[in-house]
Image (cartoon, helix red, strand yellow):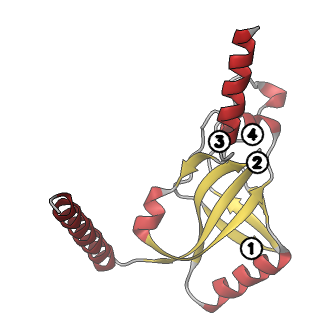
Amino acid sequence: MARAKQQLAKRAEKAANDSGDKVVATNRRARHDYDILETYECGIVLQGSEVKSLREGHAVLSDSFARVEGGELWLIGIHIPPWRFSHGFGSHDPDRRRKLLAHRSEIKDMKLELERQPVTLIPLKLYFKEGRAKVELGLAKGRKTHDKRHALAERDAKRDMDRARKSTSRFL
């Protein structure tokens, strides 16, 4: 009986510490290639086998983007491989377009920004929040090669300053 109580206490402690957000995939290349101007959180419409595949951590966000068509938001180019136990009827097309769920006002804002300036919608992160699959979209403007080098130099300089500050504070 005591062992069961210990297991229940561990589960309760783990549930209290767990924030509920499980990151499935990130698009690290996007932050290097683009300047992110604004971010949006959107839901995503998935089939059952896609959800199970995502829960196992399988997804590829590289070379994907979002587009506003007919007042709806679509995610194009994302690859979610089939779940290993689904065959035939239960499986899905890994490269199909997926509908994103956002408030109508957010979709209108995105459409205006896309028409007004040369920007694109890039998925930055795919994660689960309170059991629901979410996509973090970034309104992104492409960087030139010299801008990328400049951003890397700034990051290195900041890292060196933090390292120097940390080493001097250690001796005080």
Contact, CB < 8 Å: mark 3 with mark 1?
A: no
Q: Quick one: which residue is furthest to the front in this view?
A: 172
State the mark number for residue 130.
2
- The amino acid sitting under disc 4 is Val
Mark 1 neighbour class, 10 Å CA radius: few under 14, some 14 to 19, many 20 or more: some
The image shows residue 122 at horizontal and vertical percentages of 58, 66
The Cα atoms of the two marked residues, 2 and 4, are separated by 14 Å
> What numbered label is drawn on residue 68?
1
Q: Which residue is mark 4?
A: 51
| Badge 3 element | loop
> In terms of sequence position, does the residue under pointer 2 or pointer 4 come before the other?
4
**Distance (Cα) linking label 2 and label 1:** 26 Å
Residue for badge 3:
18
Q: Which of marks 1 and 2 precedes in the sequence?
A: 1
Could you tell me residue 114's position as x and y percent? 65, 83
For label 2, the SS is loop
Task: Name the front one of labels 2 and 4.
Answer: 2
**Residue 144 locus on image (x, y percent):** 36, 78
Instruction: Decide which of 70, 43 is in the foreground and name it.
Output: 43
| Sequence-first tag of 4 and 3 | 3
Q: Nearer the viewer, residue 163 or 106?
A: 163
The kind of secondary structure element at disc 4 is: helix
Q: Earlier in the sequence, mark 3 or mark 2?
A: 3
